[in-house]
Amino acid sequence: MAAENRGPELAAVVISLLVFCLVTVGLRCYTMGYMLKRFYAEDWLAVATLVFYTAYSVFALVAVHFGLGQHVANVPTEDHPHALLFKWLGQVFYVLVAVLVKFIVGLFLLRICSHQRWQRITIYTLLGVLALFNAFYIFIVILQCTPVEFYWFRYQVNSPVHGTCNKTKLAIIPTYISLLLNVVSDFTLALLPVSFVWKSKMEIRTKVSVVGVLALGSIASLATAARIPYAKQLLSNPDYLYNFTDLAIWSTVEIGLGLSASSLATLKPLFRKLKILASTQRSRSASNVKQGTQRSTLHSRMISTLSIRLGSNAKSFREIEEENASMGSKPDTWPFTPGEKFEDVELAAFGNKTEIVKNESMVSRHDDTGEIVNRVRQFSFSNPRPPPPIHPSSPHSPRSPLSYHAVR
């Protein structure tokens, strides 16, 4: 037998996800603002979305207090308008938060794929369609009844307000279109990272982990898909407070999970600082880099010694690299120790910006340092140094008395 009151169930979901969102967005602010010393547009948007989501949660909890989740017969008649009022406010803020979450993920991906043309066009097109449709859809939600306040008095026998509400088609068709757009956009934003990470020079395991982190922001698509069967609960029915519970729960899960997951995707530098999710592969890579750095120090001394011995006309390492670059060769750079500024997840996803690729290239450069030394020798010996100038007071100077008497 179905539970007589599902209000506590809805309240538990709302409170749990609200706390989770507060923690994840707070950690996002700490990571981006304090650790990395940068705060982008999507970070500000995440803070604003958290404010709207908090308002949504408050409206849902107040609606539960006035009887949402219970059978209509068990709720006092004077509480019905209050429950419907806060239910209506929750619906409006749900649409607002849902579209803002998509923009958070979209702006995050736009900043990453700055050189991928078709991916950027796809994201811009998707966000444009979402903005236009949801601008229309939020007005449909607000104007479900005319006048607006008739919505929360519509079931009253002696209603103080009289009006009309939208027909079934106008109420349900935009809702299904919204659900379809949300599912398509979530899966598109989740799959886009695959296209520009898979071509990067990273190991398969690394690529999979990076794609997984970037796709976290679109994990709400699962809740969106689960919400579709309950869309019909938006329609008017005799038990309108109880039958709305499933849709309210899945709507809360969708936007709460989307907001928190989009913030989790930015916490990789914090996880590394706390040594969370550290793997054996990473330790092995760090060990290789450390060994390579020691070898680099030894070879650097050899190069310095060669430069001293070969004189002032010996070509420096920088001159050799500049000459190679002018001939079309790719110049090498000295290895470095990666810092926290390279640990942001978006920098760990693409090409030569990724810390992993930098670490791997560091090791490969350390292994090839002997070749660099040979190149320095080659270029240095091909430019022999001139004889040192002879000082007038030197015994070998033509003007020196010693030299004159020695010749005589």
Image (cartoon, rainbow, N blue to C red):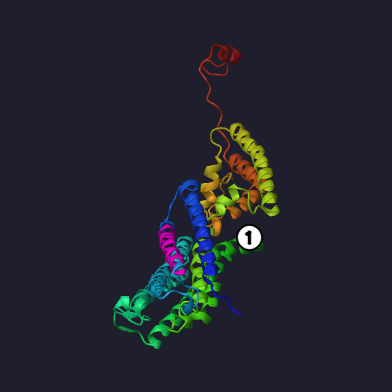
Please tell me whether residue 60 belongs to the stretch shown in magenta. yes
Q: Position of residue 348 (x, y in %)?
A: 56, 56
Quick check: 306 left or right of 187? right
Q: Nearer the viewer, residue 188 or 155?
A: 155
Magenta stretch: dominant secondary structure: helix
Is residue 355 left or right of 36 when viewed as pictured? right
Which residue occupies 52% across, 71% down?
249
Q: Which residue is mark 1?
A: 206
The stretch in magenta equals 45-64
Packing grade of label 1 (10 A; few <14, some 14-19, many >=20) is some
Vertical placement of residue 241 versus 274, above or below: below
Q: Residue at x 57, y 39 (%)?
A: 383
Amino acid type, residue under disc 1 in the picture: Thr
Q: Position of residue 207 (x, y in %)?
A: 61, 63
Instruction: Please state if 182 lies on the left or on the right of 154 as rendered.
Output: right
Q: Quadrant of residue 107?
A: bottom left
Q: Is residue 25 visible?
A: yes
Q: Is residue 85 magenta?
A: no
